Amino acid sequence: MDVSFLANLLLVVDCGSMAEAARRIGVTPAAVAQQVQALEREMGVDLLVRSGRTVMPTEAGYRVIARARDLVRDFAALKAFAQEGEPVGELRIGTIMTALLSLMPDVLAGFSGAFPKAKVLIRAGTSMELYEDLQRGDLDVAVCLHPDFALPKAYDWHLLREEAIVVMAPGALADQDPHDLLRREPFIRYDRSLGGGKQADDYLRSVKIVPQELFELNSLVAIMMMVERGLGVSLVPDIVSPVTRSLNVAKLPLPIATPPRRFGVLWHRTSPRGRLIRGFLECADKVVQT
């Protein structure tokens, strides 16, 4: 039995969808379905049943899942223990998209140079998705926003960057008042379900500005490209990314101070991959400090 098949079965159950599980691990839904079918053949029972677009465990599936979580976790710990003292192994990293498009390529380049035999798996998601994956043991480390609640003592947090919330406008409007722009120009909103989008929305409410909303989307890079093309202005975290470096946009500070967006690295204190996590942190700090 392939333990990774069990791990992916757990992901399907947690997501409620083979398509979503496949997206998170970077394979096709058909590949995930084949893995589940292989487990069903080996165990001689049906594990999942479809209900519309979602899947649910069968009675036998619930019994298998109850044991599978411990098996997957124990195997990961055993594998890490076998490799203890050697700069090898596997590091499962979850990251928010803006980090993936900014500092992560340089961090991963440094990490691969320091640990050439280590295998790295990358999964993108929202901060809350990554935190939940970390809790389930599906990730070793998460590059995410600091949760808006007190972290359990079992977890460590390391700040990487603070990003001010700014008004993003076309370069030609760089001399305009930020609040006037938010009131007057079409508004491109950063998704309010995300941390930076919620901060922007809180600010607009606090200064009693109701913008002329045109779009709402969850990609900061796409928002900056739309702003450059004159589609409107936005209120977003001031990201630093090579993807957006050449864009002709103005980043206008807010007249009233507001907390920055903070993102960093989150991991479990007792992770069996402690050596690789420490190496990852060192590489991330070097990139941030340059």
Image (cartoon, rainbow, N blue to C red):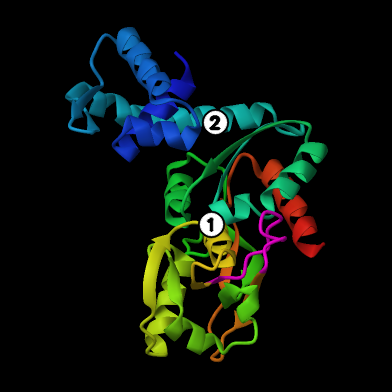
Q: Nearer the viewer, mark 2 or mark 1?
A: 1
Q: Is residue 131 left or right of residue 89?
A: left
Front one among 210 and 21: 210
Whether residue 263 can be seen here: yes
Question: Residue at horizontal 77%, vertical 42%?
Answer: 109
Tell me which label, 2 or 1, sits earlier in the chain.
2
Closer to the camera, 176 or 135? 176
Give the quarter of the image for residue 90: top right
Please indicate whether residue 138 sits to the left or right of residue 55 in the image.
Answer: right
Amino acid identity at mark 1: Ala
Asked whether the viewer can see residue 148, the reply is no
For the residue carrying disc 2, how many other residues have a C-alpha within 10 Å: few (<14), some (14-19), or many (20+)? some
Q: Is residue 102 left or right of residue 92?
A: right
Q: Is the residue 262 above or below the residue 277 in the image?
A: below
* Residue ID for mark 2: 76
Residue 142: image x %, image y %?
56, 50
Give the prevailing secondary structure in the magenta stretch: loop
Quadrant, the N terminus: top left
- On whether residue 29 falls in the magenta region, the answer is no
In this picture, is 91 found above or below 78? below
Q: Position of residue 174 (x, y in %)?
A: 64, 81
Task: Give the residues drawn in magenta, as a range.
Answer: 236-248
Q: Amino acid at mark 2?
A: Ala
**Front in this rendered view, residue 52 or 130:** 52
